[in-house]
Image (cartoon, rainbow, N blue to C red):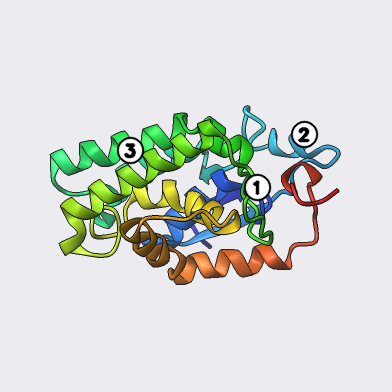
Amino acid sequence: MARYTLVIGNKNYSSWSLRAWLLMKQSGLEFEELRVPLYVAGHQDVLRKYTPSGKVPVLLDGARTVWDSLAIAEYLAEQHPERQLWPRESASRALARSISAEMHSGFAPLRSNMSMNCRGFFPGLGRSVEVAADIERIQRIWSDCRERFGAEGPYLFGAFTVADAMYAPVVLRFRTYAVQLSPVAQRYADAVLDLPALREWIEAAKAETEVIPAFEPATP
């Protein structure tokens, strides 16, 4: 029996669930997955059995409950230092934490106008001046990290870290809404899309039958 249980929402729509799930998969941590479909009658009552926030994701570790993607990432990094979920060197680790926190608390226009939808394809939708600024900022983050750490591997800090898990849903959003990226940013996005774990998530998302109209911008 796995030590951990991860409570997640719909794979097609729940970007925060993906962050925790992908981090655990890429880190080789075994866990049981409990999926709770969102935006259906009683879903928050179900979630409050596991967390006072009534939101996903939730990590269960015995009697311990950890909610929020970034809190889960920090908890797992403390529990498994051998997995090197953050970069080893302190300056790199500080940068990784900074850009992860920026993703966690920022980019509201992008998240509001380009909701995650693994099954959908909505080229040209979701654009605004504010969204364009978010896209530009994200590309600068990716390009800066790749310029500094690209020799060490294909991800933001060479090896896969929490920072990549935090930005993976953005990679999916850019694909869904056909966002044109710089060559450096596109190569990074392609590396993330090529992760077997992310491909597994996408295939599971495509197999889901739930439809949440608010996250289907092309649906009349």
Q: Which residue is mark 2?
A: 45
Mark 3–mark 2 CB contact (< 8 Å): no
Mark closest to the chain's N terminus, 1 or 2: 2
State the residue in front, 178 or 208: 178
Amino acid type for the residue under numbered disc 1: Leu
Disc 3 versus disc 1: distance between alpha carbons?
26 Å
State the residue in front, 209 or 135: 135
Comparing marks 3 and 1, which lies closer to the viewer?
1
Amino acid type for the residue under numbered disc 3: Ile
Relative to 135, is 172 above or below?
Answer: below
- Residue visible at 54% across and 38% down? 110
State the residue in front, 135 or 98: 135
Relative to 143, is 49 above or below?
Answer: above
Question: How far from the left and from the top, in percent, is residue 121?
Answer: 66, 60
Question: How far from the left and from the top, in percent, is residue 150?
Answer: 20, 60
Amino acid type for the residue under numbered disc 2: Asp
Mark 3–mark 1 CB contact (< 8 Å): no
Label placed on residue 99: 3
Q: Secondary structure at mark 1?
A: loop
In the displayed structure image, the side of residue 26 where residue 91 appears, left or right: left
Q: Secondary structure at mark 3?
A: helix
Q: Which residue is mark 1?
A: 125
Disc 1 versus disc 2: distance between alpha carbons?
34 Å
- Residue visible at 46% across and 29% down? 105
- Residue visible at 68% across and 52% down? 10
Count neighbours of disc 2 (C-alpha within 10 A) and say few if under 14, some if 14 to 19, many if 20 or more: few
- Residue visible at 27% across and 42% down? 96
Mark closest to the chain's N terminus, 3 or 2: 2
Comparing marks 3 and 2, which lies closer to the viewer?
3
In the displayed structure image, the side of residue 140 where residue 4 appears, left or right: right
In the displayed structure image, the side of residue 175 where residue 82 appears, left or right: left
